[in-house]
Structures are given as C-alpha cells and as structure tokens.
C-alpha cells in the first residue's frame, strides 16, 4: 500500500454499526435489507426499479441477457474501460466491437458511433446493444446516443460504474432517461462501497422481472409466471438458466449507510478536482475536460502528459511518482490491445484515439479522505518529475 493510494474507501462508525445490526439479525442474505437498499438507490436516481447484484460485472452480464443478447449478436462499447464492459458480451457467445473515444472527455465518441452505425447498417451488422461507459464519473452524451438507438434499433446499457452521484442534463446518472438499463459498481474505490457489489437500474418492468430471475438461478415464485395452477406454498420453478449473482444483507446494510454520505463524498471529490485544476494549470499537462451538460461524480482525476514538452517518458514519470510513495495508476489499457482480444482479431492501430490517450494518461489520487497537504505533496512530486 502506498502512503497516498490512488483511491481508498471511507468507512464510518455508523457504517460499522449498520453491518453489526444485520450480523445480529435473523437474515444475513436474501433478507429485508436488500430491497431497502434497492429502494434507496432507486429513489436517489429517480428510476422505477433497482436490482442489487454481487458485482458490476455480474450486473453487465445479466443486463445483456435481459436485453435478449444471443450468440453472434454484436455488442459495441468503448475501448477505454475495464475489460468487464466487453467481457459481458463474450459470456453469452456474442461478438464485441469498439467505438473510439472523444479526445476531450475520453468517453465513447458519438460522431464516430454514428458513422460506424451507418456503415454497419449497409452490411447488416448493426449491434444488438451499445454500452456507453461514463469514464471517470462524467456521463456520456446520452441524448444523441438514445436518438441513434431509436434510429437503428439497438438497446442501450449504461456502464455507470464510475458515475453514481453524477448528473446529465440535471438528471441523476441512473435515471435511465435515455437508456434501457444502467449498471453501478460498489467496489471500494467507487463513490460508495458495499465491499463488492453493484446494481442494475431500469424503468421497464419486463426487464426488472428478468433481472430478478437471472440473479437467482433463473428461479421464480411469482404465481403469474409459474407453469402450474394452484401451486403448493413451497413451490418454485426455474424458467431459464440464471446465476448466483446475489448481494448479501450484510453488504446492503453497508450500502444503505454509505448512501447517506453520497452527497458529501461527491462534494469533497469535486472540491479536490477543482483544486487540482487550479494548481496544475501551469504544468505541461492536459487536464480533464468537463462538458456543460454533465456534472461528474469525479471517480477518477486523469491528466495527460504533454510528452513533447517534457524530457521524460510516460513510464519514467509514472515510476518517479510511485517511488515517492504516491500510488498513481493508469485507467485504462485499451481493451482491444489485451492479448485475449488480439486473439479475437483486434490489433494496435484499430482505435488510435484510445491508444494515444493510453500513451499519455496518468490517474492521480482522488478520494474523500485525501487531505489538501497530501494533494500538495502529489503536485510537488509531479512538478519536480516534469521539469
């Protein structure tokens, strides 16, 4: 562990008490705390339905299944993301492709998406699903993506793993105003944590019912869905092949407690990001760009090195910060250049904007408990490394 890590959870005494209360109860899993947590998140986001799951990866998987993904269907996503955004399609035997990123926001480029859709329409290879990734906490431009979805007939699943607490057009990310589903992550480095865990949100009841079944082995007790009339009280049926992607009540209790501090968490990250902006503006860096219609939750603060203005390599700057006990990171290695994806036919040069970004990006520490004197130390070491 570095003296200053790139991210860290914030656990309060109230969080600990909430977990202890569940540990002393009759329910450790599949109890009443999970639906309470789902309702808290749904109410915050202004969405009708929320389904707690064991991880955002699990959420992406069952979201694609609920959307009807079949073998050999296409899923498109961003190359600048964690591998789960693409892997979720491969689990079902579907095919993956990518849309290069916007050079300013590092989110999926909508103009490139529109051009790629037009080409795919002529060859009969349109995607079944597009997964925009809200990188670093800033929403993709969802309204034009939704218009393209309506024109070309694909479904939209927001990978909002970074973006709980963010806003788009003054609506909370997760409202699903412009998408079929949205997926959050509650990993410890995210906006709130449940240890591991995630949630899928939707405004469509049919998708909600599928998600509920898919997270629990494809099983239902809903009398309206059973194949027999007048079932005995113990009866249930497996209607499809599902998974054990359940969250525990222990995790849900932590999530409910953490949600009470979400505004506080986001506000602190925003202030630290603004301070970075002010104190780094004279350095040979490209600072994060925020669009006017978005309000980021600031999961990450990523700078890009102006390598033509400094005498060191990307790797040297990264190493010097880590040698100074500052846990910088890099988000992300483009998915398409991972060895597994190169075996599928992708190669260097396929998505040049994501590759250029990767060659210059540096994730600086940003988390709720980061102190200003620690931030000053980060900036001091970075300044010395650049000059």
Image (spheres, helix red, strand yellow):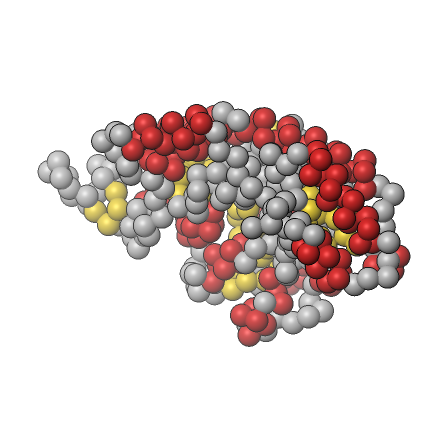
Q: Quadrant of residue 207?
A: top left
- The spot of residue 2 in percent (x, y) is 60, 49
Count of numbered circles on the image: 0
| Percent x, y of residue 347 | 65, 72
Q: At 25% across and 33% down in the image, what residue appears?
A: 27
Whether residue 59 is visible: no
> Would you identify the image quadrant in which residue 292 lies?
top right
Q: For the C terminus, which image quadrant? A: bottom right
Residue 277 visible here: yes
**Location of residue 97 in the rendering, given as x and y in whole percent from the top left corner:** 59, 62
Q: Residue at x 34, y 44 (%)?
A: 246
Report the side of 358 relative to 213 (left or right): right
Locate residue 53 relative to residue 284 in the image: left or right: left
Q: Nearer the viewer, residue 330 or 134?
A: 330
190 shown above or below 82: above
> Foreground: 322 or 122?
322
Query: Which residue appears at 78% of the width and 38% of the height?
Result: 277
Above or below residue 116? Residue 42 is above
Q: Position of residue 125 (x, y in %)?
A: 57, 63
Question: Left or right of 312: which side holds 97?
Answer: left
At 40% from the left and 43% from the top, the residue drawn is 53
- Name above or below for residue 313 compared with residue 250: below
């Amino acid at each position: 562990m570095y003296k200053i890590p790139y991210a860290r959870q914030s656990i309060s005494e109230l969080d600990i008490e909430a977990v202890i209360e569940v540990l002393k109860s009759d329910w450790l899993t599949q109890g009443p705390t999970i639906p309470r947590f789902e309702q808290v998140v749904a109410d915050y986001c202004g969405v009708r339905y929320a389904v707690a799951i064991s991880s955002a990866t699990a959420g992406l998987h069952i979201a694609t299944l609920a959307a009807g993904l079949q073998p050999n269907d296409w899923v498109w996503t961003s190359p600048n993301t964690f591998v789960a955004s693409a892997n979720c399609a491969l689990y079902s035997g579907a095919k993956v492709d990518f849309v290069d990123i916007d050079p300013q926001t590092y989110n999926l480029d909508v103009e490139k998406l529109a051009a790629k859709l037009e080409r795919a329409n002529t060859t009969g290879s349109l995607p079944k699903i597009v997964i925009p990734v809200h990188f670093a906490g800033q929403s993709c431009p969802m309204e034009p993506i939704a218009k393209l979805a309506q024109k070309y007939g694909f479904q939209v699943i927001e990978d909002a793993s970074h973006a709980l607490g963010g806003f788009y057009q003054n609506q909370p990310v997760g409202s699903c105003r412009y998408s079929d589903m949205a997926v959050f992550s509650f990993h410890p480095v995210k906006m709130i944590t449940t240890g591991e865990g995630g949630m899928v949100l939707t405004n469509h009841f049919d998708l909600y019912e599928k998600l509920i079944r898919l997270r629990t082995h494809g099983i239902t007790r809903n009398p309206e869905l059973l194949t027999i009339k007048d079932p005995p009280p113990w009866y249930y049926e497996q209607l499809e092949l599902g998974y054990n992607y359940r969250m525990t009540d222990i995790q849900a209790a932590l999530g409910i407690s953490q949600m009470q501090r979400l505004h506080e968490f986001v506000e602190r990250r925003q202030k630290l990001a603004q301070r970075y902006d002010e104190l780094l503006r004279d350095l040979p860096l490209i600072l994060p760009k925020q669009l006017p219609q978005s309000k980021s939750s600031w999961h990450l603060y990523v700078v890009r090195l102006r390598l033509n203005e400094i005498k060191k390599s990307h790797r040297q700057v990264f190493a010097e910060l880590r040698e100074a006990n500052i846990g910088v990171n890099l988000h992300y290695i483009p998915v398409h250049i991972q060895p597994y994806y190169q075996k599928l036919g992708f190669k260097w040069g396929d998505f040049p904007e994501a590759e250029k970004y990767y060659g210059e990006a540096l994730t600086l520490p940003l988390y709720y408990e980061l102190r200003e004197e620690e931030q000053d130390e980060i900036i001091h070491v970075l300044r010395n490394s650049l000059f």
